Each structure stands twice: as C-alpha cells, then as structure tokens.
Image (cartoon, grey):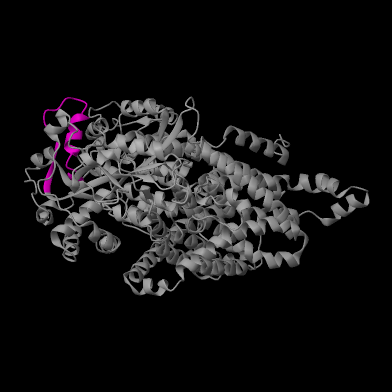
C-alpha cells in the first residue's frame, strides 16, 4: 500500500486525468469561412439566460446554411453584456442578442458591435430603432410591470393595489419582491419606471418609503419569480413581484392542468417598456453567417416564435401573435419611457443612489 | 538562483504585473475625485460592514470555539477523534459547498422549510439574512480556534491551575485569573486568523447573504462584473489589500509571540468525572455532531430527493428518491443555462486542477530546492512569496481582467500570432490564477520537507560514489515523495473549490464546478436546484478524497 502514491504514479495519474479531461470542444469561431460545404461551420450566439427559441426554427436555419448554431448563455442581461465588453478584443461569439434599451448606451460606447443595415429593418417601426447606425437591431419588446397573485388577494379579502402610491400603504407591507437593479434588467427597468414617475431625486423618497414598507430585494428575476412569488411553483411569501406584463400568459400556457383564467395579472402603473436588440460582434470571422442569423431573428418565422419562447412581443408587425398570447398577454397602456441619452448619462449614478437608499 | 527563475517569472507575470495594473488604475488622478464623490461614502460604508461582520463573526466563532477547544484539550471521551476531524473538515470545504449545504438545510427549498410546509407552518427565512452569514462563518472557522487554542490549552502546565485551586480559588476564578491570561496569546492569534478569513469572505456573502450585504470582496465583483466600473473596483481592491496585509502582519507577529509559551508540558487528558463535567462534554459533543454534520448531510440527501414539481408543473407530486438530478447533469439542453452538458463543468474543474498541480509542482519544486539550500536567498525571496498570500482571489481575478484584456506585447510581428490574442479569453487563465494561489503554499510545504533531510545523508551517498542524480533519486525522492503528494493534492483541492477568481475569469462556456453551482443556485426552479445540490455533492466528495490524501502526506511527514 505504501508505494501507491509515489510521485511517478501521481504524475501517471495526473496524465490519465488530463487525458480523460481534455478541454471541452472550444467554440469554433475560428473555423475558416472557406471551409468546404461538407463540414458545417459553427456560429456562436451569445445571450442572456432567458434566451429561448424553438428547435425547429434553428434546425431549419442550420440546414439551409450548413451551419451549427451554438448558444452561449452568459448570465443576466447586464452580466452577459459586460462579459462581451470585457472580451471585445477576442470576441466570445459572433452574434450577441439581448442588450436592452437600459444598457444600449453601454454596448454602443464600448464599441462591441459592427453596423449592419439589414434589409429587414424596413419592416420594423421606427419607434424601436434606437440606434441610427444600426449596430444594435431591435428584436422584441415587452413591458416590465408588477404582477400580483389573484387568489392570494381574493383569499385575504385585500383590494389589489392600482398604483405605485398604493404600495406604500401599511396593508401591503412586505408583500412586494423586486430585483436588484445592479444585477437584474427587470430590476433596473422598474427603477427607471419610478424615476420616470417621481423624477430625480423624488424617486429616492419613494424608495425610502417602499423600504420602510418592507420591500424585499433579491438578485435576479428567476429568484424573485420562482422562489419569492407566491403564485409560482416556489410558493414563496410575496404575492407581488416585478415581472413582465406577459408573465400571466406564461402561467396559463405552461400550466399542467388547462386553465381558463390566468392565476396572475399585472398592475399597469409603474410599467417600463424594454426593447431588446441583437448585434454582430466586432471582429467576427463569420460576418456572412452572422448577417444571416440577424436577418433570421428579424424575419417573420423567428418573430412569430418569440412570444411563446421568451414571452415578449415581436417588433416585426408582420408577425402573427399566437391565440393564447393574444388572450392572456398584455402590454401596458402607457408604459414609462426615458430618453436613451438620459439613461446613458445617469444609469450608474441612479443605481448607486438606489443601493444606498434601499440596501444599506 | 536558476532554479528560482521559473517561479519568480511566473509570479512576476501573473501576480505582480496584475497588481501593478490595479495600482495604476486605482491610484491614477481620478482616484481622489472618486473618493471625494459619493463613491467615497459608499466605500466607507462597505468597509464598515466588512469590518463589522468580520468582528461579530470572530467573536461568535471564539464563543463557540473556546468551549469546544476546552473539551477536546482536557477530556477523553468516546468518538473524540472522529468529532475533532468533523470540526476540521468545513475549513477545507469549498465555499460553494458550504453555501449549498446550508441552503439544503435552511434555504427556501431546504429540509427545514419543507418540513414546516408539511406541518402547515410559515417558512423560516434564513438565506439572505445576516444570521446566515454569521452561521456559515462560525461553521467554517471554529476548527481554527479548536486547533490553535486547543494546542495551547493542552500544553498548559496543570500545576499552575492546581496551585491556584489549593490557594482557595473557585474554578471560575481559576479560569478567569489563570487559564484565560495564559491562553490569551493563543486566543488572539486564532481570533486574528479567523478575522482575516471573515474579512475576505466572498462566496458565503454572495450566496447566503443576498443583495443586501456586500463586503469589499463582493463589491469588487459587483463593480467589475455588473457595473463595469474597473477603476472603482481597483480602489476597492487596494483598500482590501492594505487591510489584509496589515492583518497578516499582526497575525504573524502574534504567531511568533505564541511560539514562546510558559514551559510547555504534555498534559494528560482525563475522563470527565463529575456530573457537571460529563454534562458539559456531552452537550459539546452533541452540538458538534449536529452543527457540523447536518449541513454536510443535508446536501447529499437533498440531491437525491424530489420534493416539489418541476417548473411549470403545477400538480402536486409525491416526495420520492431520485437520481434524476445526477442524470440531468449529462444532458445537453439547448434551453439550459449552459450549452454544454453540466457535467462538463466537472471535467473542466478536474482539468484545471490537474494543470494547477502540474504548474505549481513544476515551478515549486525547483524553487523549494533552491530555497532549502541557501538561507540567504530564502530570506531575500520569502517576502515575494508571502505577498501573493495576502491578495484575495477576487483581487487576483480583477487584476487578470485589467491586465490580460489586451495583447501582452505587440512589438514583433514574429510573435504576433502567439501574443496578440489577449489571454483574457483563454481558458488557461483560470488554472494560471489557481497556480498563483497555490504556488506559495506548495513552495513552503516542499521547502519544509526538504529541510528535514539531514545533509549528511546526501554527503554520505556522494562519498560512496553516487551521482547527483542518484543522490536525488535514492535519498531526496523517497523522503519528500509524501510532501510532493500532499502539496499536489493541496494544489488540486485549492483549484477544485476556488470560486473567487473563477467567478470573474471562467469563460461562460468553460464553467468550473463552483461557478456552475453558483449559476444553478441563483437560477431557482426545482431542476436547477436539484442539479446544484448534485454538483455540490460531487464537489464535496472529490474534495473529501483529496483532503484525505493531504492528511496521509502530513501524517507520514510527522513520523
């Protein structure tokens, strides 16, 4: 027994381990564009964790272009974008999807995208096209709103709050969970909604009062919705959550037993409209494929796939919405917006002030 | 000197250069402006909380650890060595495993809340509170107090206490007037070390504390990875570095003072005699059993238990045993967090850890050889080797980000292809960071093993005609083989569980086990939660195996 772990045998063991653990297949962004048609090239699409698309849509694209599409999900919207920015000298992927209007300026200032004047942009309404140079192309939009658990309020006999001001009332103490705007994009959107409504610095007074009324803060949407929210599978303690106006539709469509009515609904005061963009990462060796993929994302088949996969609205008006989606999903009547340049100039300052007011 | 070169060059490139970049970023003219603005107040606030939680954690750890140290040092009782080992294990466990363990026990989906839910009682909020942070810190560091204070306690001359007692002092007075003052240096030393570890706490704060709490470490990560404010992160890293270096100096001073105790004796441990002593020993060992074993048991059990329906599945399900969470690790789901099967994270971690062992032994062994042969060089080089110990893993990760996000050299076109790709995007960066962390330890460990070989053995062999290589093969190698194994196993364990640097550096498509567990834990939904538990269990078992290897090496060295 004593001789088992001699250094020699340790090195043999290590060599074996190494051999067994050869580094996993690297992302083949380096694949030469001139590869023979027999060997499919790989196109890497980097995105945030909530990205989703039907297998068929991608399979069709892969077949038509002799390409394999690899998806790299790199964290929440902000974290994924930051990873792309930090690695911009040697891009991690060819295409980046998922930068939204709250982070758009950060991506554009960092210069991670190459402009691409997709022919499909002509079909997209001007209100969504926030980057005149077309480095970031709009794909979808949706409204961040507070969702509430209908049954919970009915059972307690509590009226549902109808405005942001209502949330400060003592009967709603500790009933709302929000996301940290420093680490979550719906969290940031909701913060911007309060700034749009109460102004700067009025929003801080609002948040101070909300804090006194026991607002719960978690790091990300997933935790807020699936652990803290009482209407989700986590059966958490809070009956109100900052989520999307389309989440009630998801509750119906994903329900195990058929439902005729959504178990949750949205409060339309304090909603913020998020638009998500796609861009071609600067320096990609697969520019041709990247262009095709961006075109795909703006085209009707992909746009029609978006609602039931990511629960947001397609920006292309030619895309038909699924029946269940039309029935249960909503957009806010008057979502708050802030000019992109104002967001760009103040985002970090607002987040820091919010952190001081609500978390510390 | 030649032998030292690889290690010194390595530390130069992968420790001192990143450190210099952080200094340049943090101390540029913008620095004062940053401090005068609202960021200065923010930094003070973070520093205040970091000190506060470290202080409270240390006090609590001492309060829990002192009675335990007393019991282990003074009494003999059943299962003593097993319980003692139990208290030492947490210190070596990766933070993600500890966080996952407490989550499995007390988290929103943990055993306690599952039980409360069954009984129709309201759930207990543990994760996301200060209590969770403090509990985990006590869990982590009590072993240190037991080891340091226990050693001093068992070396106390019992006659001093006996004399006090025969002069009429009550047992409380004996403790307060005689035992405690004699133990003070040991308590101070243990307290400083615990404080140092709590001060640099990262994974625990991030995973058990939630967004409300940020230590300097966590704030560096937030500023760098979420707010992309690298100068602010650098200022925080420098503050952190100054504090840890100060604490390290205090610690090594008190450690030196500790090594000159009042006439050490081997104090025999006795069986508890009076009823009070027996009750005390019983209470303490029961506490040890529950406090240290429960989180470590809750984790593997939770990884094979299905207690709730999958996401979107609304119907109730019968609780059952399942291996699904382990099976799911091998499945590559396009819509899942990674576009590789999660088990790839385990393969990456093993590959990184193997590389770390190779790098740190390849550079550490020659360096240790050189240091053990010449005291003058050793004295010169020592501080260079100590400094990397003071830098936290997150600081190191930040240093790599600000250093290697651009090509290292772009001078000669001949080297263009080799050096023009920024290292930041290379998967090698993680094992390089881990080597930087492990190398000083490996050199120390090998150096002390080499120092124990009497030079006469080598001289005798040489006189008898052995070539230098034969001398090495027949004299040095067998005597330090164990040290090599334990150093290698140490480097392996460090790399396997390291979370701070990896959380900043691991590329999304090359997750390591700890970063994957963190991702799964922060993406609730019962399948992700189950997978987090399964991976944490795997990591715990792997770590356990290598700790066992280290202990084997240590036991043999002691002989």
Looking at the rendering, in which quadrant would you find the N terminus of chain B? bottom right
Residue drawn at x 69%, y 46% is B484
Q: Position of residue A74 (x, y in %)?
A: 39, 44
Direction right: furthest residue: B464
Q: Position of residue B172 (x, y in %)?
A: 47, 65
Magenta range is A239-268
Left of B460 or right of it: where is B394? left
Q: Give above or below for B76 relative to B310.
A: below
Residue drawn at x 25%, y 41% is A121
Instruction: Decide if residue B31 is in sight here.
Output: yes
Left of B192 or right of it: where is A126? left
Instruction: Decide if residue A215 is in sight here.
Output: no
Residue A126 on the magenta span: no
Residue A241 on the magenta span: yes
Residue drawn at x 76%, y 47% is B479
Q: Position of residue A157 (x, y in %)?
A: 6, 43
Q: Nearer the viewer, residue B305 or A309?
A: A309
């Amino acid at each position: 027994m004593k001789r088992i772990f001699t250094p020699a045998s340790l090195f043999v063991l290590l060599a074996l381990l190494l051999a067994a653990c050869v580094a996993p297949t690297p992302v083949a962004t380096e694949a030469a564009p001139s590869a023979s048609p027999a060997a499919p090239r790989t196109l890497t699409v980097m995105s945030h964790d909530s990205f989703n698309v039907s297998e068929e849509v991608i399979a069709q694209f892969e077949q038509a272009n002799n390409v394999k599409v690899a998806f790299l999900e790199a964290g929440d919207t902000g974290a994924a974008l930051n990873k792309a920015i930090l690695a911009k000298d040697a891009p991690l992927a060819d295409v980046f999807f998922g930068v939204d209007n709250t982070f758009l300026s950060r991506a554009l200032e960092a210069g991670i995208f190459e402009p691409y004047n997709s022919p499909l942009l002509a079909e997209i309404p001007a209100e969504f096209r926030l980057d005149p140079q077309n480095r970031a192309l709009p794909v979808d939009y949706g409204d961040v709103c507070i969702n509430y658990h209908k049954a919970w309020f009915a059972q307690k006999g509590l009226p549902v709050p109808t405005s942001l001001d209502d949330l400060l009332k003592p009967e709603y103490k500790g009933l709302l969970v929000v996301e940290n705007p420093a680490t979550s994009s719906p969290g940031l959107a909701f913060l911007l909604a309060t700034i749009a409504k109460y102004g700067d610095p009025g929003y801080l007074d609002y948040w101070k009062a909300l804090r006194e009324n026991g607002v719960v803060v978690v790091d990300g949407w997933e935790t807020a919705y699936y652990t803290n929210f009482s209407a989700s599978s986590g059966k958490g303690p809070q009956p109100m959550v900052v989520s999307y106006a389309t989440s009630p539709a998801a509750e119906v469509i994903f329900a195990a037993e058929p439902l005729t009515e959504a178990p949750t609904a949205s409060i339309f005061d304090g909603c913020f409209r998020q638009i998500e963009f796609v861009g071609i990462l600067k320096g990609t060796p697969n520019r041709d494929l990247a262009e095709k993929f961006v075109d795909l994302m703006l085209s009707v088949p992909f746009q029609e796939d978006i609602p039931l996969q990511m629960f947001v609205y397609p920006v292309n008006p030619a895309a038909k919405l699924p029946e269940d989606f039309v029935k249960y999903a909503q957009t806010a009547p008057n979502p708050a917006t802030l000019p992109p340049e104002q967001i760009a100039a103040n985002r970090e300052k607002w987040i820091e002030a919010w952190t001081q007011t609500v978390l510390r | 000197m030649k032998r030292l070169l690889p290690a010194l060059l390595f530390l130069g490139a992968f420790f001192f250069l990143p450190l210099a970049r952080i200094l340049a970023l943090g101390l540029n003219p913008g620095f004062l402006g940053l401090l005068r603005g609202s960021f200065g107040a923010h930094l003070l606030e973070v520093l205040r909380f970091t000190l506060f939680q470290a202080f409270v954690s240390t006090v609590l750890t001492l309060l829990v650890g002192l009675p335990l140290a007393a019991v282990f040092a003074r009494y003999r009782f059943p299962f003593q060595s097993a319980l003692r080992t139990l208290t030492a294990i947490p210190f070596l466990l990766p933070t993600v495993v500890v966080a996952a363990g407490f989550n499995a026990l007390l988290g929103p989906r943990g055993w306690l809340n599952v039980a409360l839910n069954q009984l129709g009682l309201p759930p207990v909020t543990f994760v996301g509170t200060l209590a969770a942070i403090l509990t985990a810190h006590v869990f982590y560091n009590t072993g240190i107090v037991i080891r340091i204070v226990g050693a001093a306690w068992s070396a106390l001359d019992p006659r001093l206490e006996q004399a006090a007692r025969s002069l009429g002092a009550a047992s409380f007075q004996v403790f307060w007037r005689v035992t405690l003052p004699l133990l003070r240096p040991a308590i101070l030393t243990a307290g400083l070390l615990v404080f140092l570890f709590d001060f640099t706490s990262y994974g625990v704060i991030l995973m058990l504390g939630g967004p409300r709490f940020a230590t300097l470490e966590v704030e560096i990560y937030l500023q760098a990875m979420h707010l992309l404010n690298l100068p602010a992160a650098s200022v925080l890293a420098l503050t952190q570095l100054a504090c840890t270096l100060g604490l390290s100096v205090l610690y090594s001073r008190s450690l030196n003072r500790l090594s000159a105790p009042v006439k050490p004796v081997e104090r025999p441990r006795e069986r508890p005699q009076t009823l009070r002593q027996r009750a005390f020993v019983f209470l303490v060992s029961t506490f040890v059993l529950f406090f240290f074993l429960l989180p470590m048991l809750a984790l593997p059990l939770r990884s094979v238990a299905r207690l709730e329906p999958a996401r979107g599945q609304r119907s109730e399900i019968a609780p059952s045993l399942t291996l699904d969470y382990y099976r799911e690790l091998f499945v590559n789901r396009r819509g899942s967090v990674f576009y590789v099967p999660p088990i790839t994270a385990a393969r990456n971690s093993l590959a990184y850890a193997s590389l770390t062992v190779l790098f740190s032994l390849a550079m550490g062994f020659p360096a240790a050889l050189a240091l053990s042969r010449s005291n003058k060089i050793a004295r010169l080089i020592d501080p260079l080797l100590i400094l990397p110990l003071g830098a936290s893993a997150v600081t190191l990760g930040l240093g790599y980000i600000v250093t290697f996000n651009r090509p290292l050299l772009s001078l000669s076109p001949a080297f263009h292809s080799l050096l023009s790709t920024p290292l930041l995007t290379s998967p090698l960066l993680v094992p390089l960071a881990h080597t930087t962390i492990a190398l000083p330890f490996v050199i120390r460990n090998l150096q002390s093993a080499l120092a124990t070989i009497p030079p006469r053995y080598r001289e005798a062999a040489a006189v008898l005609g052995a070539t230098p290589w034969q001398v090495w093969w027949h004299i040095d190698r067998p005597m330090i083989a164990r040290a090599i194994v334990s150093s290698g196993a140490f480097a392996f364990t460090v790399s396997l569980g390291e979370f701070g640097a990896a959380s900043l550096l691991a590329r999304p498509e090359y997750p390591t086990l700890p970063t994957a567990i963190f991702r799964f834990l922060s993406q609730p939904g019962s399948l992700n939660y189950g997978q987090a538990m399964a991976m944490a269990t795997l990591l715990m078992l792997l770590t356990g195996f290598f700790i066992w290897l280290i202990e084997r090496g240590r036991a043999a060295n002691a002989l």
